[in-house]
Amino acid sequence: MLDLAAGFATLFTPGPFLYLIGGFLMGLLFGAIPGLTATLAIALLLPFTFGMEVVNALVMVMGIYMAGIYAGSVTGITVNIPGAPSGAITSIDGHALMKKGHGAQALGLDAFASSIGGVIGALVLMLLAEPISELALLFRTPDKFSLVLLALVTVTVVARGSIWKAMIATSLGLMISTIGIDPMVPVGRFDFGSPHLVQGIGLLPAVIGLFAVCELLVQAGLPSRLAQGESVAKMPRLRHRDFIPSLKTIREIGPLTYIKSSIIGVLIGMLPGGGASMASFIAYAEAKRTARRPEEFGEGSHEGLAASESANNAMCGGAIIPLLTLGIPGDAVTAIIFGVLLLHGLVPGPGLLADSGDVVAPMFAALFVASFLVMISVLIFGPVYLRLARINRGLLYAFIAMISMVGVYASSYSSTQMWMALAIGVFAFGLRRFGYPIVPMLMGVILGPYLEEFLRRSLIVSQGDPFVFVTRPASLAFLVLMLVFVWFLRIRPSRQAAG
């Protein structure tokens, strides 16, 4: 049994607490700048953790994790370039609010929802780690396939505009994800005999191309005055307290939205490959399905912003559960945290909580405290975030372009991946000019490898029987939920419009 009181006591000693603050600030910086994600921050920190005390290293990593996931939406809200894939959905309504002159409100709601989600995720982690890990263990490969399919279909149907264009964009993302080494047989695919393509297209180059490079090209095509930020409504002089969400807005969103979205985030986080992006999209779609004013989604919906961001940070607690209890990382960040644990002689698995509770308890406490630091950070740095929309766009985008390319190279040490990011960005720019949504394409790139792997493994185990996906109760439930989303978000509204 974990001694959580001792864990909090250890955290609030000067050493670990300073490491938590340092990690949190590092996560804010890396999460907010496109290309420098929380994954990259922890990866760069990994060699340095070897010389740290294990508690300090794990506490610092938790600060980076929570701050990095939250900060991915900051530049998405202010300049419509998410710092990380997890901020893509939040950017839709957040930047719409920014253009209306409600940037402080958007950032405040963003931070509040992230704090709520983070707290709920950390509480679930602390109180229900072992029971929930047993539940996650019940999910088999067909169930995971149906969950990934649910996420892909959901992001397609919630995309604004033509459903056919959204489907094409998703398919293009899936096609990009198949380039490189076959996940089950060591053979190159769709590489055209090129040794550079055989390594595939990494997630980070795809994200940088689809959002940073594409957005830079879009901004370059705008009139010079519009590119300097005059598309954003003029805002009055702001004070720090302007970033505190009003009780009226919080009541309009409703506690159910925060709780339901956070639970979705925790559950998605527990499944390997789930991650913040999938949690954000599914929570957003569920919020839109049950919203009183679904037509506001995509136009600056408070509820949509709160739902996606609550799920994002709740995912952190969920992803840690299978890592520590089963030795299965829930996302890319926890995969690197796995390495941090191994560096210090800790082997994630069923015996970790019992054998090293004195080390794990401060780690849990750090994730909980970092959730509150998110809200504190926007009160301190909120005005700085908003200045991103007011500074000279030429300088800002030149800086983003440089940092993005450096981030791509630092993640792979491959100039080929830099060229891939540029090529994908130009291609995405062409798609946007013809009204194709970019977010479904990104989801196809992210989830494509999991969709393929889980499909092929399921069919191998079932000896080619496709009914395996409807005979498993959990898989069938995900498929039914997918049909429910399609009906309520696309078929029913189109029939009502036609009627």
Image (cartoon, rainbow, N blue to C red):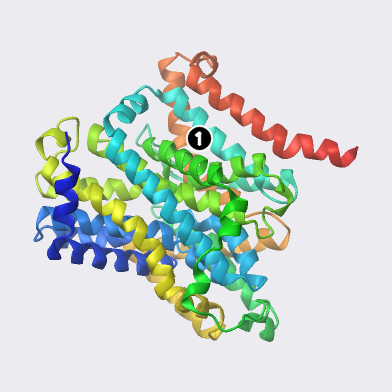
Residue 438 occupies quadrant? bottom right
Please state, as top left, top right, bottom left or bottom right, where the C terminus lies in the image. top right
- Extreme right residue here? 499
Q: Is residue 168 above or below residue 296?
A: above
Residue at image location 40% in from the left, 56% down from the top: 69
Residue 141 screen position, x and y as percent: 41, 25
Residue at image location 45% in from the left, 39% down from the top: 263
Q: Is residue 161 above or below residue 423?
A: above
Residue 21 screen position, x and y as percent: 25, 66
Residue 118 screen position, x and y as percent: 39, 50
Residue 423 visible in this rendered orientation of the protein: no
Residue 116 visible in this rendered orientation of the protein: yes
Q: Is residue 330 above or below residue 54?
A: above
Q: Is residue 163 above or below residue 106?
A: above
Residue at image location 89% in from the left, 39% down from the top: 498
Residue 314 screen position, x and y as percent: 41, 46
Residue at image location 62% in from the left, 52% down from the top: 252
The residue that mark 1 highlights is: 148
Q: Is residue 448 left or right of residue 335?
A: right
Please state, as top left, top right, bottom left or bottom right, where the N terminus lies in the image. top left
Q: Amino acid at mark 1?
A: Val
Q: How many labels sit on residues?
A: 1
Kind of element beneath mark 1: helix
- Extreme front residue here? 247
Q: Name the one closer to the observer, 214 or 359.
A: 359
Q: Is residue 65 left or right of residue 340?
A: right
Mark 1 crowdedness (10 Å alpha carbons): few <14, some 14-19, many ≥20? many
Q: Is residue 28 left or right of residue 146?
A: left
